[in-house]
Amino acid sequence: MSGGLNSLKTTASAGRAPLDASINFPEMEERVLEFWSKIDAFKTSLAQSKGKKRYTFYDGPPFATGLPHYGHILAGTIKDIVTRWAHQTGHYVERRFGWDCHGLPVEYEIDKSLGITGPQDIEKMGIKAYNDQCRAIVTRYCSEWERIVKRIGRWIDFENDYKTMYPSFMESVWWVFSQLYHKGLVYRGVKVMPFSTACSTPLSNFEAGQNYKMVDDPAIVVSFPLDNEPDVALLAWTTTPWTLPSNLALCVHPEMKYVRVRDAKTGSVYIMMEARLCALYKPEDTGAYELLEQFPGSQLEGKTYKPLLPYFQHLKAERGAFRVLCDTYVTDDSGTGIVHQAPYHGEDDYRVCLKYGIIARDSKLVCPVDASGKFTDEVPDFQGQHVKEADKNICDLLKKNGRLVNHSSIGHNYPFCWRSDTPLIYKAVPSWFVRVEDIGQQLLDNNQKSYWVPKYVQEKRFANWLAGARDWAISRNRYWGTPMPLWVSEDGEEVVCVGSIDQLAELSGVRVTDLHRESVDNIEIPSKLGKGPLRRIPEVFDCWFESGSMPYAQSHYPFERAKDFEDAFPADFIAEGIDQTRGWFYTLLVISTALFGKPPFRNLIVNGIVLASDGQKMSKRKKNYPDPMKVVESHGADALRLYLINSPVVRAENLRFNESGVKDVVKDVFLPLYNSLRFFDQCAGSRADFKQPGSVAGAGGGGHPDSDNVMDKWILSYSQSVVRYVREEMAAYRLYTVLPRLVSFVDNLTNWYIRMNRKRLRDAEPATLNSLFYVLFELSCLLAPFVPFTAEFFYQRLITFLDKQPDEEAASVHFLALPCADESAIDDEIEFCVSHMQSVISSGRIVRDRNTLPIKYPLSRVIVVHNDDRVLQAVQSMESYVLEELNVRQLLVTKDKEAYKVSLRAEPNHKLLGAKFRGAYKQIQENLRALPAAALEEFQRTGRLELPGGHVIEAAEMSVSLRADSGDSGGSGGGSSLDCHVDQSLNLLVLLDITPDASMQREGLAREVVNRVQKLRKRAGLQPSDPIKIFYRADGDGDLSGVVREYAEFIYDTVRQPLVSLEEAGQVNLQQAMAHEQCKIKDSGSLDLWVFSTASGDNSAQQQQKQSGKIPLSSAGSKDEVRLRFGQEERVLKLRNPADGSLISMNRLLKEVEVLFNLIESGQEVRLYRDAELKTLLNAHTCDSTEELGQKTVYVSLR
């Protein structure tokens, strides 16, 4: 890649090779990575910033049991941007990578690979052997993670990473727990919890909320005959038939109305809620039942009924089970209004049955389901069956016993295990809990002390979760995790909580170096109460407790560097996905609040979820998304970064990932950006006297360049406005506002400033380039945190134009401080003028496109209508640019709307006004449509409008837009044909006079000729400065030759060479032409163009082309030539290289076709065919040699 990354350390202009016309961005990035590695860029940047103000960042630890997906890449990119920004704004930023090593993700993988079905299998193989297996896979993908994270451009420390399985980390977790325990915030209890039968462990409520799915479950109505009225049955509804064997009671709402009805079909008498009769009878079936009695639910309280199944019927006498209870949690929106109570399978069931004494906190559990989700021998009819599989058999038994009244199915959202992706059940499990409910108000208060982006996630989603937060079950009946440091006597009365390795050694006399179960389970602590040895409880910590402890544990707090930690706590910044509102964000806050009474972080960015292109969750099994690294290899990491962070996903919204979007970023942002650098490089590189004074500070040591040119002033002002804006918004962590402004900056630089000033910049004195250099230099610094590879590439190229090369402190753009806005360069008036000029030009282009009027063809006038003198004066001040860019002869600005049939129209905000006026809004809309122009103009001035009925509309609730009738218009030139476009954002109307004019048509033809010459010169690989000679031949009915002669001066000024008629040139050897094109000019015949190089010596463009092996175009007719046709365009190509006579290959022919028809940036596959119908494909397999294509036509198509 000529002039590519080999220029990273090239400083002498003599050694600066020109930049290629095209660039391979992934290859460029790989070479930047090599450069960073060579200078050890990340470590060097940390060393340079040592001693500066600390900026603390916590990296949420991922599991290393799989490779990074787009969610990881997105969050990692956000973290990288913010931490780079912090570094480049004068901070010392440690960035340590972390790994979540314990818990279900690891154990589940081992269980699958070893065929483990339950705890008994693990006990059989031994805990040490099992944990050794877990330890072995934890780092399976660590090296891949490091490679991918680095390839994405993220700078983070892998050498000093933290792992939750390190003894130092685990010891700090013990300390955290001991602090909570001694504060009285830990207790042991029995609670109904979400339970993963696949993983044989309970989950916390926030884990259960992470993976809901729509499922179909049975929905059955079951009868419960009353003891004192056997012919009358209570009806209960459930979607979990497997819980019916554990039924101990029924619950009704005490105040809602219940009814006794006789079923017309069976004669059976049922009791159910009146509002829920629809669960059994269709509303129109009024004769399906007879209403016998109506009464409140409280009248049912205490009534006993016949147990559904016999398994626990002894509890009727022992505990008063199988009776009706009352509670207001019963609703009238589903079921029958009578809820069956299985107290050890439902939280409300447990609470109500405990209140009525049917169960006690210390009573034996009625929970005949084991850790694998199978029925125990307490339920012999279904013993060994998984509860979900037993649903059908239970229904069959109930039907056989005459207790099944109705059987249907229901689709509803149901929680699944986040790791095994299997349905959860609810099951009572003895667990250790943190008293979250006791600190609930503190959690809400501390939540308000942090700054979240976007704020609504903090104030709505997270605050609502905190308001309903329940005690957190932190124990897990598993093996691979941090053991809970509780040693308990056999009777449970004496408990010792250990907070460190030293304390354990002091209490037990045993010192360990590892804290996993195999190392501590057998350690005993002597009782101080004479109760015998205390033994450790078998549970381990929930891995979320470990990740919530990471701020302390990663630093081995409080055992090492305690003051360093305390000085840097809370963290300045964290970032993760929106799913962590019930995960890491929550556990961080709970533990920090419990320990120190303050939030764990100051600033937080929440990102949304990256979905597949069809809106579904990305799935390896479905293969519904492209491999992230394949995307990087094809388009580059910077393109992927920019695609992700310049999307709604950084506002915590979802993003449907589409690779074509990444490709568009390359096309719309990176290629124009590269071309801007290449243009500057061409202009400055051709002038030996172009040097910028000074080193890198201020892009040359001083302030901004001075220039009298309005466009120079504008781009300098605009660039500084962007610097100011980006600094302000980044200080507020609003990436979603920053990236659109930066992309707009690139567009303004490339598509406005450079394109409109190309000729001036190329031809004028070297000092003319100072503004462009300054802006490119500042842009490279400003882009550095966002697109680090591209910024580095720009920087290394630009510093070769400094007269004093930077030292090691400035060896990389990422070592520099980010620019501060130069307020003296900001000119709001110039920016105002140019923005309105851009609006006029863009609107005019829209009109041209709509009327198929290429910009090459001049028009007579453009008319700008606006009611503000300042706007009209701004447009008038930019007249020369408007005329040139729109190729019109005259600019008119006016307030006279009527002259051009322009009207005002009210644009109400329907959402705001509909909510404000409700039923009256329909009439208000009619009133708005009838408003006269004077009323709308008054509203524009005052921002207030009063309508009949006293209805007032404020400025934020309505806007006023311009409308114009297209077609013939009087104006100032009756009979003219005008077409218009309105820029609604500025309320600016632009009309173009599109009346045909013969003289303007001829000027358009001259511009078309110039366009063809420029394209031909580009295809020949010639630089604008290469000396050439151009010959032409015009054929057909049109007067092309006359146009070329008439506009000879214009053509010469643009092309910088005269066009010589072949007929007047005498003897010309066309075979020596660098390039030839035969093209049809619309309605004017055909034009042949030949370009010859007039350079001499080995460095001539022609010699360079021959040496590079490029195949020139030629005239048609030879057996060594092929005619190529793409749509209406034709080209003739030589099949042999004039340099050595070698025959072109099919692959080379394809590449030449891409160049000839300017298809390189199309993003589509180029295909060749032998026939115009595009049926016979032409490639290396179907064509033995390109020689057979001589004197034939080949057809080009895109796929």
Image: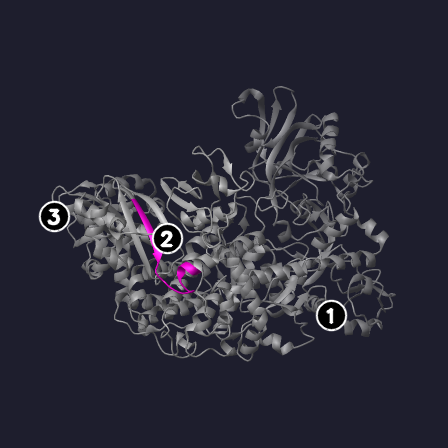
- Who is closer to the viewer here, 81 or 212? 81
Question: What is the C-alpha distance between the residues marked 1 and 2?
Answer: 86 Å
Pick the residue in front: 24 or 902. Answer: 24
Q: Which of marks 1 and 2 is nearer the N terminus?
A: 1
Task: Tell us which disc is closer to us: 1 or 2.
Answer: 2
CA–CA distance between discs 3 and 1?
Answer: 90 Å
Q: Name the residue under label 3.
A: 972
Q: Given the image, on which type of amino acid does mark 2 rest?
A: Ala
Task: Reply above or below: 165 against 352.
Answer: below
What is the magenta range? 1087-1103
As shown in the figure, which amino acid type bears the numbered disc 1? Gly
**Residue found 56% across the figure and 29% down from its top:** 278
Relative to the observer, which residue lies in front, 102 or 1058? 1058
Q: Is mark 2 on a helix, strand or loop?
A: loop
In-image side of 673 versus 923 (left or right): right
Q: Name the residue under label 1.
A: 499
Horizontal side, residue 674 vs residue 403: left or right: left
> Sequence-wise, which precedes: disc 3 or disc 2?
3
Q: Mark 2 points at which residue?
A: 1073
Pointers 3 and 2 in contact (CB under 8 A)? no
